[in-house]
Image (spheres, rainbow, N blue to C red):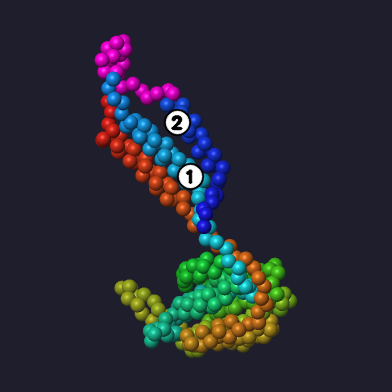
Amino acid sequence: MIPHFHNPWVLLLLLLLPLFAWLRGRRGPQPAFLYSSVHLVQPIHRTPRTRVGSWQFALRWLSLALLLIALARPQRPLGEAKISASGIDIVVALDLSDSMAAEDFKRNGEPVDRVTIAREVLTKFIENRPGDRIGLVAFSGKAYIVSPPTLDHDFLIRNLGRLTIDTIPEEGTAIGSAISASLNRLRDLKSKSKIIILMTDGQNNSGKIPPLTAAEAAEALGIKIYAVGVGTRGVAQLPRKDAFGRKIYVPMNVDIDDDALTKIAERTGGKYFRADSTDTLHRIYAEIDRLEKTTAEVKKFQRFDEIFRWFVAAGLAVLLLEILLTHTLWRKLP
């Protein structure tokens, strides 16, 4: 595709370059020697003229022109594509409390912590729903917006990949706050269906908003909540480091409040799932993926590729070449 310029008005400065070059030529170069009389140099007036000076100034003007083009920010459009949007807006609330570090899931026979598996399954879910606006809320003792509902799933997946247990400093599990933060991102959107997917492995013990109160608000707004309890029942083994930096496991009793999560989901017309293995978690998201969809045609504009750096590199290279030749092959008397 044909490149375009983000700051096209800068290109008008290119029209001034010939004027500056002409004025520079009228003034002439600074003489290398001063003579009291031109008769002293008449015997050498027939010496052939060199074109080195012309090449030198040509390189300098070319360098300036390339840098001006770079300043105009040339961009290569990556095009636009029409996609079918489902009309469903989704916000995923992901628990990042300390207990999510428990390694009670398996991947290729190796133990994997809950957060890693949750990120991987959620990434595939996002990739399978290109027409949905999907947002992300991370919570522990407090809830934070990671991404508002967006069709830019590349941006969403990049931010999802950055989430770890250490992302949120506040300890605890604020389920009510997570639901409330998700509702705030969905309430003003004019879509036909709005859904919250709540992923947690504990009980609400932080925050000022009771989970059932948040669920009542979701019911009033017509927003469904699909709750997913992540992890096995009983004692979880949390990885820790001892005084010598070695990895050890500390037992921790983690009880998922199945009754409360079931009430939250059913109050809003959603459903509660229990994920105690990697395969189960995949099946849960596959079931959620089969939600009823309302198709509508929209346009999705892709980002532009910035190519100004190539003009900057070319301009600096030409300038460096001119300086190098001036001090070597084109060296002149001071």
Q: Is residue 198 visible?
A: yes
**Element under label 2?**
helix
According to the picture, the residue beneath numbered tag 2 turns out to be 21
Q: Which mark is residue 307?
A: none
Front residue of this view, candidates 242 and 247: 247
Dot 2, how many residues are within 10 Å of its Cα: few (below 14), some (14-19), or many (20+)? Answer: few
According to the picture, the residue beneath numbered tag 1 turns out to be 69
Dot 1, how many residues are within 10 Å of its Cα: few (below 14), some (14-19), or many (20+)? Answer: many
**Element under label 1?**
helix
State whether residue 62 is above or below residue 199: above
State whether residue 153 is above or below residue 257: above
**Residue at the image point whose x is 46% and y is 50% from the top:** 308
Magenta highlight on residue 75: no
Which contiguous range is marked in magenta? 26-45
Badge nearest the viewer, 2 or 1:
2
Q: Is residue 294 left or right of residue 158?
A: right
**Residue at the image point whose x is 33% and y is 31% from the top:** 51
Q: x and y percent of residue 76 in the render?
A: 50, 56
Magenta highlight on residue 31: yes
Q: Is residue 36 visible?
A: no
Q: x and y percent of residue 284 in the render?
A: 55, 85
Report the quarter where the C terminus lies: top left
**Residue at the image point whose x is 26% and y is 35% from the top:** 329
